[in-house]
Image: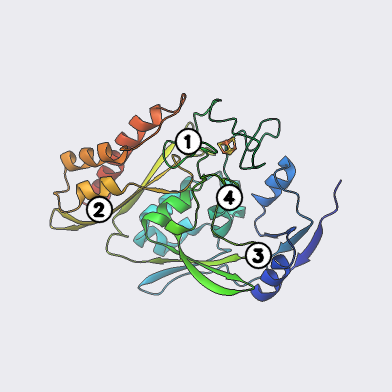
Amino acid sequence: MRPVAYTRADTVETAVRTVGADPGARFIAGGTEVLNLIREGQDAPDRLVDVNALPLRYIEFDGNTLHIGALAKRVHDHPDVLEKFPALAQAGASAASPQVRNMATAAGNLLQRTRCGYYRDRRFPCNRREPGSGCAAIDGINRYNAIFGGSEHCIAVHPSDLAVALTALDAVVHTRSRGGARMIPLAELYRLPGDQPQAETVLAHGEMVTAINVPHKAFASRSHYLKVRDRASFAFALVSVAVAVHLQGDIVSDVRIVLGGVAPRPWRASAAESVLRGERFDDASRRAAGRAAVEGAVPRAHNGFKVTMVEHAVARALSEVEADHG
Ligand code: SF4
């Protein structure tokens, strides 16, 4: 058994200084991901810095922006989220199981690692776990893997539901490190695998997510999250879609369409958005957007079904917006 030192941080400064000074240190909050990774052997930290005492559990809406502290839990239950950011509420409610949702923090959800089965099973080569060892998924069972954004080194998908909805809502992540504070649009937080799949985000070691801010843009209230999965609970998305639509009359003036379960990061379907912008919001334009959403897809041996699934899920999610909000 390996000994692991444990420190409880009472300020953000202490937390980032302690982790930043020790390459073997990790932040821990809800523990739903960090402890899994240790148990499964994907990570072996020598120090855990407990950040649960930090004052980052708030969820507040100031009339323009939703402020979510990194340690906030059950964001989807907050009345302002339910009313003003429905896609976020639906995404949060669809994540994991009730037990995990009670423990998991907002930041931990965004920073969870891929669920690629080969990453989690040390008997198989995996460039993300062990750079240069190969990718067992490319010629293996790849039903759950990416159809967008992969490389010859990795075709893993990002598992977070919240990240998909928050990307569609133009959320911004706030971080702190020993070097100071910065803001990162969520759409820029995750890296594509390229030839370095082990680096999943642009965060430096010891850089802590402290908050997530979500602007209340015109399309936020008219948003929807649709998740397609193998079973109704405790299953990651085969395909998910977050849509947000602003109409002027019946014409689409602004729109976001972001896909989950299909790429190493929330995947913005820009071509589908272009098809809708300036058009009437009707069945024909919604189906055209679905067709455009799958342009450039690269399906593998076992996940070609995702192409058809994305096409229909995009049209369906857009129809659900219409049904929910008129
Ligand atoms: Fe590892 Fe990525 Fe290949 Fe999965 S897809 S085995 S995570 S390198």
Q: Name which of mark 3 and mark 2 comes first in the sequence.
A: 3
Q: Name which of mark 4 and mark 2 comes first in the sequence.
A: 4
Residue 232 disc label:
1
Q: Is residue 95 visible?
A: yes
Q: Residue at x 51, y 71 (%)?
A: 182
**Rendering coords of residue 161 (x, y %):** 47, 48
Question: What is the C-alpha distance between the residues marked 4 and 3?
Answer: 16 Å
Q: In the visual, does 23 lie left or right of 306?
A: right
Residue type highlighted by circle 4: Gln
Report the residue marked by disc 3: 206
Name the quadrant containing residue 245: bottom left
Q: Secondary structure at mark 1?
A: loop
Report the residue marked by disc 4: 112
Q: Secondary structure at mark 4?
A: loop
Q: Name which of mark 4 and mark 3 comes first in the sequence.
A: 4
Crowd rating for badge 1 (residues with CA inside 10 Å; few <14, some 14–19, many 20+): few
Q: Secondary structure at mark 3?
A: loop
**Towards the viewer: 161 or 63:** 161
Residue type highlighted by circle 3: Gly
Q: Residue at x 53, y 69 (%)?
A: 58
Q: Residue at x 22, y 38 (%)?
A: 287
Residue type highlighted by circle 1: Ala
Q: In the visual, does 82 lie left or right of 113?
A: left
Question: What is the C-alpha distance between the residues marked 1 and 4?
Answer: 21 Å
Q: Measured along the vertical axis of the image, is residue 254 above or below residue 36?
A: below
Q: Name which of mark 1 and mark 3 comes first in the sequence.
A: 3
Question: What is the C-alpha distance between the residues marked 4 and 2?
Answer: 32 Å
Q: Secondary structure at mark 2?
A: helix
Of badges 4 and 2, the one in the foreground is: 4
Q: In the visual, does 243 lie left or right of 283?
A: right
